[in-house]
Amino acid sequence: MDEVSKIIRIGPLDFDLTLMGMTLLTCIIIFTFVYVCSRNLEMKPRGKQNVLEWVIDFVKKILSDNLPSSEVSNHHLFAFTMFLFVLVSNVIGLATKIEIHEGNQAVSYWKSPTADPVVTLTLATIVILLTNYFGVQKFGFKNYFKNSYAEPAKFLMPIKLMEEVTNVLTLGLRLYGNIYAGEVLLTLITMMATSKGIFSFIPSLPLEMIWQGFSLFIGGIQAFIFVTLSTVYLSHKIEAES
Amino acid sequence: MTDYFLIGSTPNTTLTSMAFVSLSFVLLLLLIKKFAWQPMTKMLDKRAETIANNIDDAERSKITAAQLVAENEAILKQSRAEAAEIVRKAKEVAEKDANVIIQDAHADAKRHLEQGKKELEIEKAKLIDSAKHEVADLSIEIAEKIIKKELDLATHQELINSYIEGLGSQNED
């Protein structure tokens, strides 16, 4: 259970190699998918182009449900990238498990990037910072501040300000909790499978499959929720309430 | 595991990980934008435009077609009216002609009849004339024979003629 990532030290900085590797792999997978699917674009979509268009439309639907239609195209690319990043991050850890024992530690080389709170909180921070940035961009600082924190009543301002912090925490930790819990159970099932040889291996197999399927579902749902909530927070900042 | 819940308790990798994730996310976003998003949105816009144009074209074609149909119907109606008019005129002319021909024929027939009658009268008159002469001659001969006396033809001709005329008028009465 006490999994640790591979950590290397370069100069004064420590680097979490597992996390960085998996993040990089996620990016490569997403870029490859998007790049391959967007070759030879046609007016009449066929095959892989349909897949990409479906994802784009799916994200567009999320945006247009929460934002005024004039704002949808401005944030479409960001939401699209975020959705794919979170989705692939969520499910990539389900594929396999690589553990190498180094000394008395089991060092893990494969995990979902989003099973790490640092990653999810980073993503949540990016989202919240960007929503505030877009608010300032749209209304100017004064009006942005008034619209975001002084409406509908001034005495709510402390709560509203605190909400920014809690939004980061809830957005990040919800994702982390879901994915991390899934990985923990996967690890437990794997441990059970290897504990008693063939007798525990065979019954664990369907269990692992079921849990992987469920985690796949959870991963999709969480990616959807993450983008939806980001859009909602964004709409609070760029829509005038009065 | 408790390490994870205390944010910042693992300061050795948190900052680098955050930087790496942020950087890779931004990089991914830019790469997608450069290589996929722009062609994609361009294509989507073009498609939307094409579809809108097609719909407009269809609408226009529909209107044009309706106009054409209306025009054709009007033309057809006009042609029908013209055809009916032509037939009606032809009938009228034919009827008129027929009447003229019949009238001519009637007139002709009448003329012929009258001519015939006239000729008949003339013939009759001639016949009567010649008969008169013959009767006169005969009467003279008969009178010659009866009275056995020579009579001057020229002096008595008038007398006899008046007698026969008297006979003729008596007969006519």
Image (cartoon, coloured by chain):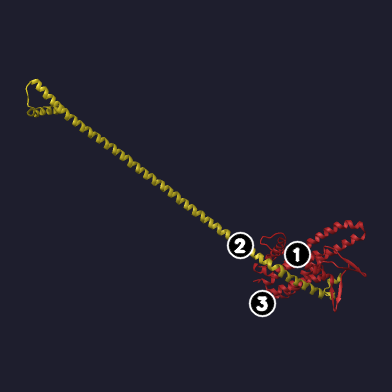
Please report, as a chain letter, where disc 1 is located: A
Decide if residue A63 is on the left or right side of residue B93: right
State which quarter of the image contains the N terminus of chain B. Answer: bottom right
Q: Which residue position is annotated with label 1?
A: A33
Q: Chain of mark 2?
A: B
Distance between mark 1 and mark 3 Cα atoms: 38 Å
**Which residue is rendered at x = 64% and y = 68% of the image?**
A70
- Asked whether the residues under the numbered discs 1 and 3 touch, taking CB atoms below 8 Å apart as contact, a structural biologist would say no
Query: For this rendering, which residue is in front, B21 or B104?
Result: B104
Foreground pick, A83 / B106: B106
Task: Identify by letter the chain in red.
Answer: A
- Could you say where residue B19 lies in the image, as x and y percent from the top left? 79, 75
* Residue count near mark 3 (Cα–Cα under 10 Å), binned few <14, some 14–19, many ≥20: few
What amino acid type is highlighted by mark number 2? Ala
To which chain does the residue with label 3 belong? A
Quadrant assignment, res B36? bottom right
Q: Which residue is mark 2?
A: B52
Q: Which residue is at a point 91% across and 61% down the rendered structure image? A: A194
The yellow chain is B
Mark on residue B97? none
